[in-house]
Image (cartoon, rainbow, N blue to C red):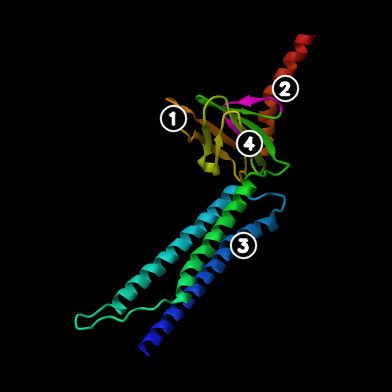
């Protein structure tokens, strides 16, 4: 009878654990997916920022890890006191295999792992496929400076861009391996010699952000800095055409 009661308790415990983890998954989807749907409904013309998806995935991982830690440590403490061997007790009974329990402690972590893998893969796949209407900016890394080239031929040592616009960065290096890192925008991408890498994002607010090289690239690595300046669409258009207009007037004056 004691053996049956113990097996019954273990089955009840792991079924409760499954229900709790299932509730966690449903709660996480409700909590983190609703903002995506809400934003899509409010502004269907704007694509979601990739970094927001990454933040939501990390929030889920942290929540799942905390709950799993509480459950496992709680179960460990409970079993340690509930089934401790008393000094007066005789020899303990030989425990038999419980295939249901073994299946559950293997299947639940596998299910969570596959969920996270699929979620992460979808985010990575999305980050590698910028929208067709994105503003393309060429980025060239070199020891020890950045160069940003716009579609009209204008170049700048700093990254200027309009807010509420999909920005596509096409990156390459002239010498060694670099990595463009803008923490304020959630942007990080390797910059590889003789190879083009792509990343896209969408800044929702105007402001200035620091640009770093996050890959050691030589003795002046720490000085490989730039600014990422997010302007309004009108201000960006004025900035982007300012020097171009001056050059056109100089060229037309020389021809005359």
* Residue 175 or residue 131, whichever sits in front: 175
| Badge nearest the viewer, 2 or 3 | 3
Which contiguous range is marked in magenta? Answer: 152-162
Instruction: Looking at the image, tell me whether mark 3 or mark 1 is earlier in sequence order.
Output: 3
Which residue sits at x=69%, y=37%? Answer: 135
Q: Position of residue 215 (x, y in %)?
A: 48, 34
The first of marks 1 and 2 along the sequence is 1
Mark toward the viewer: 3 or 4: 4
Mark found first going from the N terminus, 3 or 4: 3
Magenta span contains residue 160: yes
Residue 186 visible, this orientation: yes
**SS under mark 1:** helix
Query: Would you name the residue on which mark 3 appears?
Result: 34
- Residue contact at pointers 3 and 1, CB within 8 angstroms: no
User: Upstream in the sequence, badge 2 or badge 3?
Assistant: 3
Label 3's element?
Answer: helix
How far apart, in angstroms, are the residues tagged by discs 3 and 4? 29 Å
Which of the two discs, 3 and 1, sits closer to the camera? 1
Q: Quadrant of residue 190?
A: top right
Residue named by callout 2 = 245
């Amino acid at each position: 009878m004691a053996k049956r009661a113990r097996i019954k308790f273990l089955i009840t415990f792991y079924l409760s654990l499954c229900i709790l983890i299932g509730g966690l998954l449903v709660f996480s989807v409700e909590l983190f997916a609703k903002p995506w749907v809400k934003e899509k409904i409010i502004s269907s013309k704007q694509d979601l920022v990739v970094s927001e998806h990454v933040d939501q995935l990390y929030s889920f991982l942290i929540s799942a890890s905390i709950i799993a830690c509480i459950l496992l440590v709680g179960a460990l403490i409970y079993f340690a006191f509930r089934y401790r061997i008393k000094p007066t007790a005789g020899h303990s009974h030989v425990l038999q295999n419980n295939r249901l329990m073994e299946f559950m402690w293997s299947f639940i972590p596998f299910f969570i792992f596959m969920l996270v893998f699929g979620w992460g893969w979808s985010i990575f796949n999305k980050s590698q496929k910028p929208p067709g209407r994105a503003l393309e900016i060429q980025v060239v890394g070199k020891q020890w400076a950045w160069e940003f080239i716009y579609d009209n031929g204008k170049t700048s040592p700093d990254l200027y861009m309009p807010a509420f616009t999909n920005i596509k960065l096409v990156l390459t290096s002239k010498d060694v391996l670099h990595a463009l890192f803008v923490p304020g925008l959630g942007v990080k991408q390797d910059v590889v010699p003789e190879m083009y890498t792509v990343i896209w994002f969408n800044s929702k607010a105007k402001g200035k952000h620091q640009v770093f090289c996050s890959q050691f690239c030589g003795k002046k690595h720490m000085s490989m800095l730039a600014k990422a300046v997010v302007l309004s669409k009108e201000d960006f258009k004025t900035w982007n055409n300012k020097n171009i207009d001056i050059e056109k007037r100089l060229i037309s004056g020389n021809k005359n």
